[in-house]
Image (cartoon, rainbow, N blue to C red):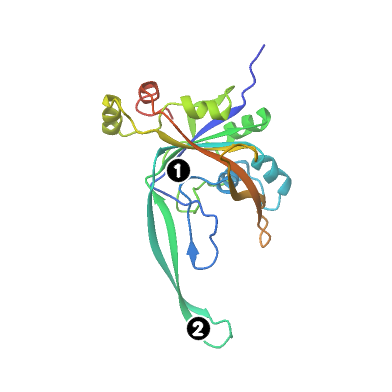
């Protein structure tokens, strides 16, 4: 009997990433890991799904999301200045300074669990997307192919997170970690049911990406850690993508 794959493992690697949840007004924030809305938007772009196709957006968002932080990003901030912005009274103009936050040098293992047919379609399109892919902002493009060596698997997302080869590519970093006896664990964020003890509510589950009518609902996640094992370091060295 042929085993049906249930999860797809992806690598989110870029010099800069931004995963905002309150990016309106003059402050554009970022969380410290990919959001459900950001991942869903990226998958929709890979498949060429229009913004107003709420049915397909819901199908993509319904997949279980698990994230492992293989390299913590450095929170950075820059400023954007816009001149000649009309005042609210309509008389005269002003200069607006906005703050933009982003993650530098972050590296994530992103695992999706759901409908096998949908996962097959995503695997076929993720490295040859219909539209350009980016990590939160159009300038923040992937540094390497998204699909990892594991690709489609019959493991649950929570299991992939604990066994998938480490995505770090720096040979010196890998060599240093291999020699350590007491390694720092990797942070994990996994979708869970609302009744799970320790569950945290996040308001980043997309309902619609329609222009002028973007809507989001809540989801619950479980924050945890998983050991960085010797096998995870040596498997697929120096990169499994």
Judged from the image, the secondary structure of the residue bearing numbered disc 2 is strand
Which image quarter is the C terminus in? top left
- Where the N terminus falls, by quadrant? top right
Residue for badge 2: 93
Q: Residue furthest front?
A: 197
Circle 2 Cα neighbour tier, 10 Å, few/some/many (<14 / 14–19 / ≥20) = few
Instruction: Return the residue nearer the eye: 88 or 93.
Output: 88
Horizontal side of residue 133 vs 100, given as left or right: right
Relative image position of residue 166 (x, y in whole percent) = 40, 29
Q: Estimate the spatial distance between the alpha carbons at disc 1 and disc 2, rounded to whole Å.
A: 38 Å
Query: Which residue matches tag 1?
Result: 142
Percent x, y of residue 47: 62, 41
Q: Position of residue 24 (x, y in %)?
A: 55, 64
The residue positioned 65% from the left and 21% from the top of the image is: 4
Upstream in the sequence, badge 1 or badge 2? 2
Question: Which type of secondary structure does the marked residue at label 1 adopt?
Answer: loop
Q: Residue at x 67, y 45 (%)?
A: 57
Viewer-nearest residue: 120 or 220: 220
Q: Is residue 126 visible to us here?
A: no
Q: Is residue 74 above or below residue 123?
A: below
46 or 226, nearer to the observer: 226
Vertical position of residue 82 compared to residue 38: above or below? below
């Amino acid at each position: 009997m042929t085993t049906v794959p249930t999860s797809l493992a992806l690598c989110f690697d870029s010099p800069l990433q931004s995963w905002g949840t309150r990016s309106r007004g003059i402050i554009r924030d970022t969380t410290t890991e990919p959001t459900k809305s950001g991942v869903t938007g990226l998958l929709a772009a890979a498949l060429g799904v229009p913004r107003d196709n709420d049915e397909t957006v819901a199908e993509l968002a319904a997949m279980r999301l698990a994230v492992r932080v293989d390299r913590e990003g450095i929170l950075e901030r820059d400023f954007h200045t816009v001149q000649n912005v009309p005042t609210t009274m309509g008389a005269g103009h002003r200069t607006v300074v906005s703050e933009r936050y982003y993650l530098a040098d972050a590296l994530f293992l992103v695992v999706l669990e759901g409908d096998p047919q949908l996962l097959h379609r995503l695997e076929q399109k993720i490295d040859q997307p219909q539209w350009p892919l980016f990590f939160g902002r159009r300038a923040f493009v992937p540094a390497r192919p998204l699909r990892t060596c594991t690709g489609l698997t019959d493991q649950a997302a929570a299991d992939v997170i604990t066994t998938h080869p480490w995505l770090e590519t720096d040979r010196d970093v890998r060599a240093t970690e291999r020699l350590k006896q007491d390694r720092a664990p990797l942070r994990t964020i996994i979708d869970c049911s609302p009744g799970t003890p320790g569950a945290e509510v996040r308001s980043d589950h997309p309902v619609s990406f329609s222009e002028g009518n973007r809507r989001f609902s809540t989801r619950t996640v479980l924050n945890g850690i998983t050991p960085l094992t010797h096998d995870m370091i040596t498997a697929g060295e120096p990169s499994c993508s």
